[in-house]
Image (cartoon, rainbow, N blue to C red):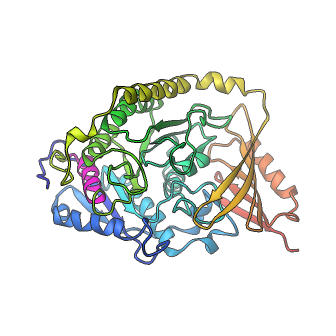
Amino acid sequence: MSHFMPTAPNPTGLVLFPAFDWCISPTHPEREERLLYTKDQLIEEGLEDVENISFFNPEIAQHKDIDRVHICVPSSQKLLTESHLISAGGAIRAARAVMDKQVKKAFAVVRPPGHHAMQTVFGDRGFCIVNIEAIMVEYIRRHYGVRKVAIVDTDCHHGDGTQDIFYNDPDTLFISLHQDGRTLYPGTGFIHEAGGPSAPGYTINLPLPPATSEEGFDMAMERVIMPLLDDFQPEIIINSAGQDNHYTDPITNMNFTAQGYARLNRLLNPDICVLEGGYSIEGALPYTNLGIILAMAGLDTSNVKEPDYDPRNFIQSADMNSHIATVCDQALELYKQRDRLKKDLAGEKVVKTSKRIFYDTTGFDVEEERSYHTCPHCPGFTEVTASGLNNYVHAFTIPFNSCKKCRDRAKDLYRTTDPRGFGSVVLQDRVADTYEVKKNKN
């Protein structure tokens, strides 16, 4: 299928974890065969013998790593399986390989996926319980002192969980390139979802119409994503590398190919990739993963093609190109207006939002209210109340870049909040790296 001709070789690390003992059901699209076919393809192509590609074993993430990001109800210990901890640990291992300079780039080819897992977690939604990219990001920040991070989510589904976790963080540029939420789960990811009061314009959504092919993705990359990354100047770039935009994927409606994924990765040039979706087990994943890995390693990708690949099947109409160009222009303008948008909100000391979160796997809703306590010197802190399945939580989250005044205010509110009426009251302090819980004993 491929002939490896080094162009600009990059020492690249791979972490593979198929999660043999975890599945939603034996026939569910999110099952271990997703990665087993890929593993077989990588071995068949001889990647184990390529000098600048190294394989690393995943680690087991600690519950402390989970609680640094999530507010799990009733607790991370009760919600997570060992496979979830290993999947998150696989992402952490990939990050450590890069940060410790064992390799230049790394790809965590792991499952279960994570980008639909929001800050509050009551169970499984969108095949995700914990957000493995977010856990990895906060691990990097905690252990390596990294501040500015860009996350580019190229999964076909909107990365609503990652957006939720970093929505009010001006040190995280989150960009999601996905099929229009009017046509696909989770029904979000519109341009107006642009960031919280301390970070307007730092969440960029690019909803693409069904049947978008290479032309549309290239347009979004060249007109929006790369200019924004050049301006933001992140210390590290992370790609949530979902591969369900592929034309053979059974649960989406896009028209992307392995060649498109390889070109996207080469242009994006991420430091770390983390596998998300992709459910065409035989028709797509062995080819798309191989294309991404070779592109990361600086190797030739020209012969990585599906057996039925025909470039004539991936030509877009002029109307579709025009629509995508408009989406790009709107997103770019929103980013340019971020300072003005922040000034417009400067007088608001507390900004409140509410939403209903649907847990589709088991079919229940969680009602969540969020108060962003703003500050002129830092992103402030966040107060969250959420209820569902007869569980209640009232939480205060202090971000890693919070000032002392905001941190003290959040801790005072935590101390004076009575757990009666709630299942628990939580203080999540990323500055001190602590997670405290007061339980209702009635």
Residue 349 x %, y %: 79, 34
Image spot of residue 126 (x, y percent)? 53, 59
Give the percent coordinates (x, y) of residue 39: 27, 66
Q: How many marks?
A: 0
At x 38% / y 41%, what residue is drawn? 211
Task: Give the side of residue 268 with respect to residue 391, left or right.
Answer: left
- Please name the residue shown 45% across and 37% down the image: 208
Identify the image quadrant of residue 270.
top left
In the rendered image, the vertical position of residue 221 relative to residue 181, given as above or below? above
Q: What stretch is highlighted in magenta?
A: 285-298
Q: Is residue 45 left or right of residue 149?
A: left
| Residue 123 makes an appearance in the image | yes
**Residue 6 lies within the magenta run:** no
Nearest the eye: 91 or 367: 367
Q: Position of residue 120 (x, y in %)?
A: 66, 57
Q: Main secondary structure of the magenta part?
A: helix
Q: Residue 433: in sight, yes or no?
A: no
Quadrant containing the N terminus is bottom left
